[in-house]
Image (cartoon, rainbow, N blue to C red):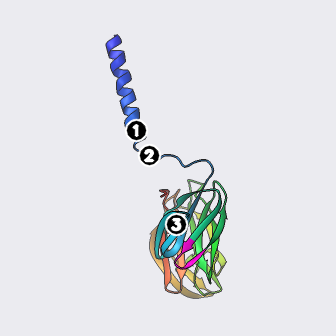
Amino acid sequence: MRTSFLSAALLLSFAAAQDTGLYDPAPPADSAFVRVLNAPTATLGSKSVTAEKGAASAYVVIPQGELTAKLGTVSGKLKVEAGNFYSVVVQGSKLVLLKDEGAENRAKAVLTIYNLSKTASVDLKTADGKTAIVTGVKTGMSGSRAVNGITVTLAAFSGTKSLGSVKELKLERGNAYALVLTDSGLTITQSSTKTK
């Protein structure tokens, strides 16, 4: 009886030891989560990150407080607060810190459009222009909305003019999606819960 109990205890402790390797360690409680948009070369603090043209990088765990960031040739200091998600973009010759909406409602998908184009104000709609999702997003800003999980073709509009579209996008509940509008068009990046 004692031998089988010890064997069971050893097996449980071995399983627990193996289980700890399955997951990344939880970030410290005073962490913020920061990423860059549309920046092939960038650093956040001491960490190098990349986001191809029109795309979003993975989030990087950053201690709350002042952060030194550099996107391409533009650098600056930004302030981040613990528990928040942010995207850093270049606007003109300065860095802008945009606060992101998290996917808190697991029954919905979150769509965020970032207007990095020269168009003064854009709307995110279904591609036929009939259903508005996010409206009035100014240059260098973002707008978000939680939506149901569906498959849909989306487009960015200036008035009735389509500026770019993403076809047959499958929106999954509990996930977040970054739509980045540049003067070259509209791209989509599914936001990753993985951090660097």
Image marks 3 and 1: residues in contact by CB distance under 8 Å = no
- Counting residues from the start of the chain, the first of labels 3 and 2 encountered is 2
Q: Label 1 belongs to which residue?
A: 19
Q: Quadrant of residue 170?
A: bottom left
Q: CA distance from mark 2 to mark 1?
A: 8 Å
Instruction: Look at label 2 and name its amino acid.
Output: Tyr
**Which element is circle 2 on?**
loop
Q: Is residue 74 within the magenta segment?
A: yes
Instruction: Look at label 3 and name its amino acid.
Output: Tyr
> What is the magenta range?
70-75
Q: Label 2 belongs to which residue?
A: 23
Image marks 2 and 1: residues in contact by CB distance under 8 Å = yes
Which dot, 3 or 1, sits closer to the camera? 1
User: Whole-percent x and y of residue 98?
Assistant: 64, 69
Instruction: Look at label 1 and name its amino acid.
Output: Asp
Q: Quadrant of the N terminus?
A: top left
Residue 19 sits above or below residue 149 on the image: above
Q: Residue furthest top?
A: 1
Q: Residue 87 has which mark?
A: none
**Rendered residue at 62%/79% (across/down):** 123
**Rendered residue at 58%/80% (across/down):** 116
